[in-house]
Amino acid sequence: MVSPAVELAGAELRRGPRTLWSQLDLQITPGEFVAVLGPNGSGKTTLLQVLLGLLPLSAGTVAVQGTAPRRGNPTVGYIPQQRALDPLTPLRGRDLVGLGLDGHRWGPGLSGRARRRERVHEALRQVDALEYADAPVGSLSGGEQQRLRVAQALVGDPSLLLADEPLLSLDLARQRAVVELVDRRRREHGTAVVFVTHELNPVLPVVDRVLYLVDGRFRVGTPEEVMTSENLSELYRTEVEVVRVRGRILVVGAEESPVHCVPDDAARPAAEVGAR
Ligand SMILES: Nc1ncnc2c1ncn2[C@@H]1O[C@H](COP(=O)(O)OP(=O)(O)OP(=O)(O)O)[C@@H](O)[C@H]1O
């Protein structure tokens, strides 16, 4: 029997006096795409840290591919939350992506090195980054750096991909390209995906389930199940309206909602709202 990619049971995480989430039961199967939503500080990044083996749970159990999470697991790909790289970072884009490969796997011989180069080249091509692959990473724009991070996370052919707001800084076309790339990978390679995002709409066509965290409360289910006015009003403890417009989901009334309508949006055509 294949182990779940992720299995959380009765999971609880406390930071200082706050309980970020508790009694969280979640099984993610290979190839499943789960979006994690929630306002700032709701514990989305912290969840990824637990799955990376960087933070222990305060209660409950967690397993990644059937065993306890551990740092540096080569079968787990990670796209960290974006931070601009130091302009003096002495790496080219190609080197940064190569760091995503476990050197031992390819062996020290010539064929190992050639295979490694090929893999890096292919990962760069998939995110459309070949053009700047030899430039110093610190000289690249935020979006260009972000595409390299995506390539770095995918180059090792992970069975589980943990992505922390990977669409930040990307224009709409590049957002679509990254979502399609991740979707193709999970369909063709069975990679399970945990995708933290402030914007549900760009991933809505490919998402299997949503985990929505708000101030210690959460809902898990398909977007249809979770994204209802009733659920979000309960999570935010205020009246929230969820509206569906031309295949998009708009949330009105939850100021800190990841897919909320800000006042400026009111002036734009409804179909555009939430398109950012
Ligand atoms: N080392 C730490 N010690 C104590 N509290 C921490 C620590 N790191 C994070 N926190 C707190 O844990 C909470 C959850 O943080 P986390 O980064 O998981 O939120 P998030 O949902 O990813 O938010 P954002 O959308 O802003 O990225 C925050 O309130 C944060 O201040």
Image (cartoon, helix red, strand yellow):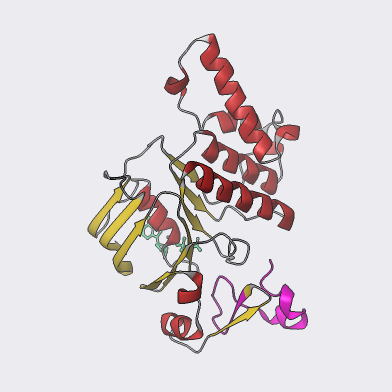
Q: Quadrant of the N terminus?
A: top left
Q: Position of residue 118 (x, y in %)?
A: 61, 24
Compared with residue 92, is residue 27 higher up or lower down, i.e. above or below?
below
When asked about the image quadrant of residue 132, the answer is top right
Determine the residue located farthest toward the top in the rendered image.
Answer: 109
Magenta highlight on residue 274: yes
Q: Nearer the viewer, residue 242 or 267?
A: 242
Give the residue at the far bottom of this rendering.
239
At x 24% / y 55%, what residue is drawn?
A: 61
Q: Which percent across, then down, holds residue 212? A: 45, 70
Up-down: is 234 above or below 140? below
Residue 275, image x, y percentages: 69, 68
Q: Is residue 35 magenta?
A: no
Residue interval drawn in magenta: 249-276
Q: Compared with residue 224, is residue 8 higher up or lower down, i.e. above or below?
A: above
Q: Quadrant of the C terminus?
A: bottom right
Q: How many marks?
A: 0
What's the residue at 48%, 44% (across, down)?
Answer: 78
219 horizontally vs 246: left or right: left
Quadrant assignment for ligand 1 = bottom left
Residue 206: image x %, image y %?
56, 59
Q: Is residue 90 visible?
A: no
Q: Which of 40/224 is in front?
A: 224
Q: Is residue 17 left or right of residue 163?
A: left
- One can see residue 27 in this view: yes
